[in-house]
Image (cartoon, helix red, strand yellow):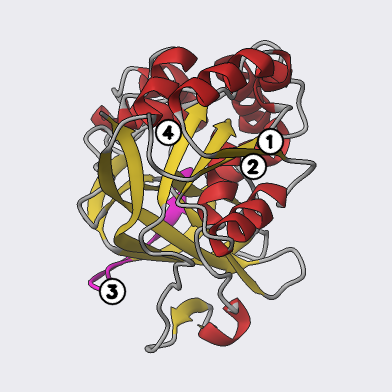
């Protein structure tokens, strides 16, 4: 039985209501495996982040997210004090820049993150190999093994035109991915994550024009081109199982940056199938790098939207920074 004082944050709507329908069984499993335990349910966007911060300030030692990738993202954000993005970062010639003295502030550096994946997409669980049943996942939460992992922080232009930001655990992107997120989050997801993302991708593909972007990789390389998508990957999968960044590691201090260049409509139409087989890297317009920082600015007037762990909170310009092994994650016995 886990010795961590554990606070569980569950999104009852995750998995098209699967968490709500199956909660009595999940709670029985948790109470059998974890000693001191408290449970709270989210009531809307952003609530999981607030609950996680309050729990950590109150002295809870492990915070567990129950739900999909969006719930995981919100809980992870709650492990840190919210930065003042308007004072800690700045815009300079269209680029987002971090001021030299800024550092993330963990609420409790020794706190542990755990999760029970029950959402429609389930991309982060694929990266960490958490593909077992709920029973098996809860059993792991009762163990003692901890893995330090990287997070990313994204600082971007928010809907109000001011700098905003968000920590992310899995994958972010600029371009087509943000457009898909804006659409898929309005869809009914009863057919599952893969279907939802595939349908949204097909709809957005008809409307999307490749975006003119300037991309800086670790301030060492600058690329000016039109891009179908620029992916900044901590994990390996996004979009309901698309294997976009094979070999990406969540503990090496680097993002895998996958650049989808100026793909024709014909080439981009075949991407969904290629991505599920990790064959997109064979396309001449697709390349990848490893980087600890990635900065993107628009070279066009039309907005270029972002995907941050499956959400679409803002648009380019954006700065992505890898925060090496800044979070402790429960991985098992």
The reply to whether the C-beta atoms of the residues labelled 2 and 1 are less than 8 Å apart is yes
The reply to whether the C-beta atoms of the residues labelled 4 and 3 are less than 8 Å apart is no
Where are the magenta residues, as a range? 217-230
Upstream in sequence: badge 1 or badge 3: 1
Upstream in sequence: badge 2 or badge 3: 2
Upstream in sequence: badge 4 or badge 3: 4
The reply to whether the C-beta atoms of the residues labelled 1 and 4 are less than 8 Å apart is no
Which residue was labeled with disc 3? 219
Which residue was labeled with disc 2? 179
Which residue was labeled with disc 1? 207
Which residue was labeled with disc 4? 124
Q: Nearer the viewer, mark 1 or mark 3?
A: 3
Q: Secondary structure at mark 1?
A: helix
Real-space Cα distance between discs 2 and 3? 27 Å
- Percent position of residue 21, x then y: 72, 14
Q: Nearer the viewer, mark 2 or mark 4?
A: 4
């Amino acid at each position: 039985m886990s010795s961590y004082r554990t606070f569980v944050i569950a999104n009852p709507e995750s998995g098209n209501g699967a968490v709500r329908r199956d909660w009595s069984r999940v709670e029985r499993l948790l109470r059998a495996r974890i000693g001191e335990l408290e449970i709270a349910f989210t009531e809307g966007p952003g609530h999981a982040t607030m609950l996680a911060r309050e729990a950590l300030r109150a002295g809870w030692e492990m915070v567990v997210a129950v739900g999909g990738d969006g719930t995981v993202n919100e809980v992870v954000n709650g492990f840190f004090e919210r930065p003042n993005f308007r004072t800690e970062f700045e815009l300079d010639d269209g680029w987002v820049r971090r001021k030299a003295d800024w550092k993330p502030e963990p609420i409790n550096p020794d706190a542990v993150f755990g999760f029970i994946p029950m959402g429609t997409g389930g991309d982060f669980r694929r990266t960490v190999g958490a593909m077992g049943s709920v029973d098996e996942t809860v059993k792991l939460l009762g163990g003692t093994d901890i893995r330090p992992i990287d997070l990313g922080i994204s600082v971007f232009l928010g809907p109000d035109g001011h700098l905003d930001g968000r920590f992310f655990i899995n994958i972010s992107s600029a371009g087509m991915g943000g457009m898909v997120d804006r659409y898929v989050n309005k869809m009914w997801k009863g057919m599952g994550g893969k279907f939802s993302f595939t349908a949204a991708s097909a709809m957005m593909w008809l409307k999307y024009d490749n975006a003119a972007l300037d991309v800086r990789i670790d301030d060492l390389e600058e690329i000016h081109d039109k891009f179908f998508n620029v992916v900044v990957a901590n994990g390996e999968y996004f979009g309901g199982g698309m294997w976009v960044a094979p070999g990406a590691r969540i503990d090496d201090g680097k993002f895998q940056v996958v650049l989808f260049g100026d793909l024709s409509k014909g080439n981009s139409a075949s991407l969904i199938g290629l991505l599920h087989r990790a064959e997109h890297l064979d396309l001449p317009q697709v390349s990848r790098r490893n980087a600890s920082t990635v900065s993107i600015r628009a070279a066009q007037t039309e907005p270029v939207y972002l995907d941050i762990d499956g959400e679409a909170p803002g648009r380019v310009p954006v700065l992505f920074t890898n925060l090496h092994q800044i979070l402790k994650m429960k991985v098992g016995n």
